[in-house]
Amino acid sequence: MKIVFAPFCGKFVLSLLTMASFVAFCVLSAPLARAQSTQVSGTVRDASGAAIVGAQVELEAGSFTSTVTTGPDGKFQFDSVPATSGTLIISAKDFQQLKRPWSSQSGAPIEVNATLQLLSLSQSVMVTANRTATPLGETPASNIQLTQSNLEALPALTLADKLRQVPGFSLFRRTSSMNANPTTMGLSLRGLGANGASRALVLEDGIPINDPFGSWVYWDRVPETAVQSVEVAEEGSSSLYGSEAMGGVVQFLTRQPEPEALSVDASYGNRNTQDLSLSAGGSLGKWYSMVSGEAFHSDGYFLVPGAYRGPFDTLTGSQDGDADLTVGRKIGENSRIFARGWYFDDSRNNGTVGQRNDIRMGGGALGSDLDLGPVGTLTLRFYGEGETYFQNFYSVAFNQSSQYLTDSQTVPAQGVGGSAVWRKSVGTRQTVVAGFDEHEEIGHSHEIITGSTGSEFRQTSAGGRQRSFGLFGEDMIQLSPGWVLNLSGRYDHWANFAASYICAPGPAPSGSCPQPNQNFPDRSYDVFNPRATLLHQFNSHISWSTSVYRAFRAPTLNELYRGYRVGNVTTDPNAALMAERLTGGETGLDLTGFQRRFEVRGVFFYNQIVNPIANVPLPSPANTQERENLGRISAPGFELDAVERVTSDFSLSAGYQYVDSKVVSAPGQPTLLNTWVQEVPHNSFTFEARYDHPSLFSATLDGRMIGQQLDTTGFELGNFFVLDASVARHIAYGAQAYFAIENFTNEQYYIQALNPTVSPPNIGLPLSFRIGIRYDFSKR
């Protein structure tokens, strides 16, 4: 902790010395200052003439700088400016920054009025889509960016639940990430399904956070106060990111180092839900440090509805904590090196007595962002992490009257990797990107299988190692004004090796092993994945983009070697699984109008997966399924989203996605042909109404409708609609009090369907509310 607080101490001493020197200077030069001072004032408005409240106005005049914020009438004023000319830099949320020179003759008061133009979504900068900073308008229309203010306004507590407002974003199950089993938190985009393992890559500042053993995601390991923005690229991205990015990429970009930074969010809600998120940082000379962390606890709720509940049902309580420390040094104006370490701890009750899971994880990273001048820029990342995951499973009677332990699992796993990305602008119309990344995962699932009398059937250990290496390149070319061509491609070599299954039978007569001990054969896979994107800006209001791509996903260690149980349905692993292959494309339009107050985007897409990994029922024993490669999944669809900025304080947005995701080929499994892909809704709709007046209050109302989908039980889950709301008010000095409520109509919806005689239904998050306070030092 000394490293963290030293920058603050140094900065405090430096601030005192600076203040003393400034006071002395002011005293000695007061007569001169009075003689040459100028008053600069004005009003900031939007294109409709409405005053913009809370705009930041910075005045620069030689070595003199000062910053003020516009009041309720949009007015600002600088007194005693020691110059007669300078520059005003005016910025406000959702508006384009404006620079306005000013001058005064003989120091007379001067009035400078400014009109800000709305910032369209396409004018933001995105780094995920092309692995380099690119204007959002020069990426496919499907790419989405959520800023820190967007995230704060959403009423949901967790980051994963906030991202559910993006149509097409879903986890393997409907469960809130506050209460879900971690192995069900794999990410699905555009209806591709998750199957527990994600079919999309999740990054934090360029470092993967998908679990090294199962590729699911611990969403709570990223403290919300540390997040600057979230970027979502919904098209196949293996041409730049490799295996895990088959369905797209989600990236959390954290706050950049600041001389002084502190952000805190603390809340308390029903069901004893407690959450504390903190991010702080400071600098001393060229050195800087940043620390962030989060602590969460909730007693949870009953998954099983009252009509089906029995004596062994219990609350789905959960708690987690994480800490992250970064220490770095700036090199020159635009380069830096850094070291980072993190720790994450998570424990959850899974709905019945004794059934729980725990995770302990720690890791570290070294990195650099280097400006090489005319040679370009170079980004380096090297990381490693280790974890131990524990999970136990119980067989529960359908009437919930009895249960017994069937399986206790301990899964140690490690992941190491690194990447290098080089970028260079060639002339004014071309940017090239090239690089490589490599990662390796090691993991084994150690299990103790027991029976109804508590007798031990066997102890098993299954697992192995995976290694992936990829080389990629990209060329972004401005063919002519308004036309941009983006070509990228990547070669990947994937290998699975040192894999084995070892079984030790329990005591006779119940002890037995279902298969002999064996070493699985080494396997490898080579694949090339290209992508081509063409964009055209017809005028300042209409742009069009189209993309075609190939992508792939290798099976995870979890899919190959670890089984699991949901209710009374057992799913077995399959060490012979093959890699999935995706072919897809999209085309879309982006339209703006009414002085950029209105923006609408529409995208048609088509994705097809060959050899998709799915859970397939086995003829025997009863209630057993196995992971297998099916023939083919087809997922055509379209998505629409729109934003209307009614005034500078009030906005409306909505999004809709339809995807017809189904099995179109299933050799040997005729009953699965033309069935829906499990846990994928065909229709999803979201909306948000947001009012934000800095001097009054801010309020958000959002809703989410999820259509019918097929559960893993083989039964249908009905559609549902939930409403969330929040209201917040600034108190003083950067502090804000807020109240948030999720599912305020207390809609009861199923997250697991009723399976007659096998398992009861489970329900989603009921009405939840919390009250909290935020503090941001930069907004004091």
Image: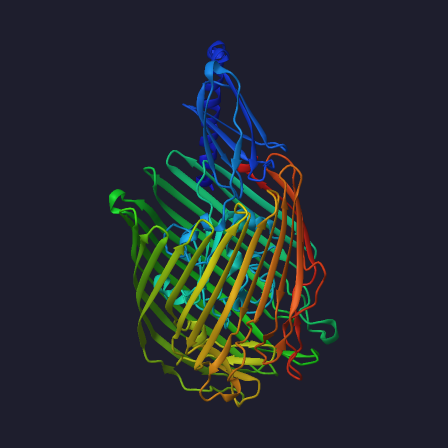
Does the image show residue 233?
no
Label count reads 0
Q: How is the image coloured?
A: rainbow
Which one is nearer the viewer's eye here, 723 or 458? 723
**Above or below — where is 767 with respect to 133?**
below
In screen coordinates, is 364 left or right of 111? left
Farthest residue, direction right: 307
Q: Quadrant of residue 72?
A: top right
**Above or below — where is 640 with respect to 400?**
above
**In the rendering, at what x and y percent does residue 451 appear?**
58, 83
In screen coordinates, is 473 left or right of 673? left
Farthest residue, direction front: 539
Q: Quadrant of the C terminus?
A: top right
In screen coordinates, is 620 left or right of 472? right
Does the image show residue 611?
yes
**In the rendering, at what x and y percent does residue 190 appear?**
50, 67
Farthest residue, direction left: 375
Which one is nearer the viewer's eye here, 371 or 167? 167
Say which residue appears at 60% left-offset and 35% top-offset: 51
Q: Quadrant of residue 732?
A: top right
Say which residue appears at 29% left-offset and 46% top-offset: 428
**In the rendering, at what x and y percent does residue 624 appear?**
54, 84
**Above or below — where is 106 with respect to 589?**
above
Say which residue appears at 45% left-offset and 18% top-offset: 84
**In the rendering, at what x and y percent does residue 456 appear?**
54, 81
Say which residue appears at 43% left-offset and 75% top-offset: 609
